[in-house]
Amino acid sequence: MEKPELLRKVAVIGAPLGYGAGKPGSELGVEAIRLAGLHGGRLIDTIRKLGYEAEDRGNVDIVRPAGPALESANPKYLQETLTSCSNLADAVATGLADGCFPVILGGDHSIAIGSVSGVAKYFRNRDESFGLIWFDAHADINTPASSPTGNIHGMPLATLLGYGEPGLVDLCGFSPKLDPRYFAHVGARDLDDGEKGRIRELGLEGHFFTMSDIDKRGMLDCVNEAIDIASQSSGGYAVTFDVDVIDPRFAPGSGTLVRGGATYREAHLALEVIAERGGMRSFEIVEVNPMLDQSNITVELACELILSALGKTIL
């Protein structure tokens, strides 16, 4: 089946939600990336230079917590996350319905509950399936029962697959959002024991391309197989990219750093191949934390990665 090509109309959508993570600061990543276009320009300007019609639709409404979460809360900031992710789901679904390619700027990875739900809502209304490629050092497949922290940014994948807190699972009025047959995860290297068990229970081992797989097979081979999996869907696939998939040497500005990640060039290669093969319907980048960055290199890298996902090449 022929897959849809990357749309030439881009809608940039900000989701400055940072309280799903354990460390503050990722909520600042949205504006930092917006201002980090190449050669002193803004992100929207660099996207337009690639030949896109691009519109910055601003930030979705994020409900701010009135105070710190109770230490015993699990998950933390549930109601705030529910409302904020609902707002994001509506914005992403609307962008797709308008014929746009959504570029979503995070925020911590809990926003994927909203952004991917928006993609799912759009394709559900069209009676089509979609795939998802998830780049991350972590599995993000905890539920409140298995989470060691109660932080929702460790739960979005489980939620989208239909496991976890009922309100989050039922966002947009249906569940699951994601068919595991069309899902692939790239770059995992730090998984909780409960997550490992859930991956095995769901039979998803063959859908995870860990850093050991990348070491043995190379990023190109692993990403091509991930695309093959996600592309089996009828409507194309979404991509969500957590910058902590990259080794901290190249991306120090994230709150959940783990040594031994992808290199600068491996990250670009992965997104260049995705853009080249076609079929991607939305792109999201998360967990950029300017408060933890060094000389703005992670923020600038995030901007560069967005451009690679949109088809920018060296020559």
Image (cartoon, helix red, strand yellow):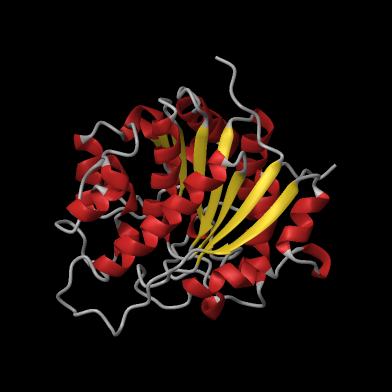
Q: Residue furthest right?
A: 315
Pick the front one: 171 or 41: 171
x and y percentages locating residue 190 in the rendered image: 36, 55
- Image quarter of the N terminus: top right
Position of 221 relative to 9 (above/below): above
Name the residue: 50% across, 27% down: 235
Corner quadrant of residue 168: bottom left
x and y percentages locating residue 256 in the rendered image: 42, 66
**Can residue 10 be seen at all in this image of the molecule?**
yes
Q: Left of 282 or right of it: where is 118? A: left
x and y percentages locating residue 43 in the rendered image: 71, 61
Q: Residue furthest bottom?
A: 67
What count of labels does the image hold? 0
Name the residue: 49% across, 54% down: 245
Q: Left of 67 or right of it: where is 186? A: right
Position of 56 relative to 132 (above/below): below
Q: Left of 305 or right of it: where is 89? A: left
x and y percentages locating residue 197 in the rendered image: 19, 44
Name the residue: 40% across, 25% down: 127
**Can residue 240 be seen at all in this image of the molecule?**
no
Q: Residue furthest top?
A: 1
Position of 63 relative to 233 (above/below): below
Pick the front one: 44 or 304: 44
Position of 26 relative to 277 (above/below): below
- Image quarter of the C terminus: top right
Name the residue: 19% across, 80% down: 70
Pick the front one: 315 or 77: 77
Corner quadrant of residue 203: top left
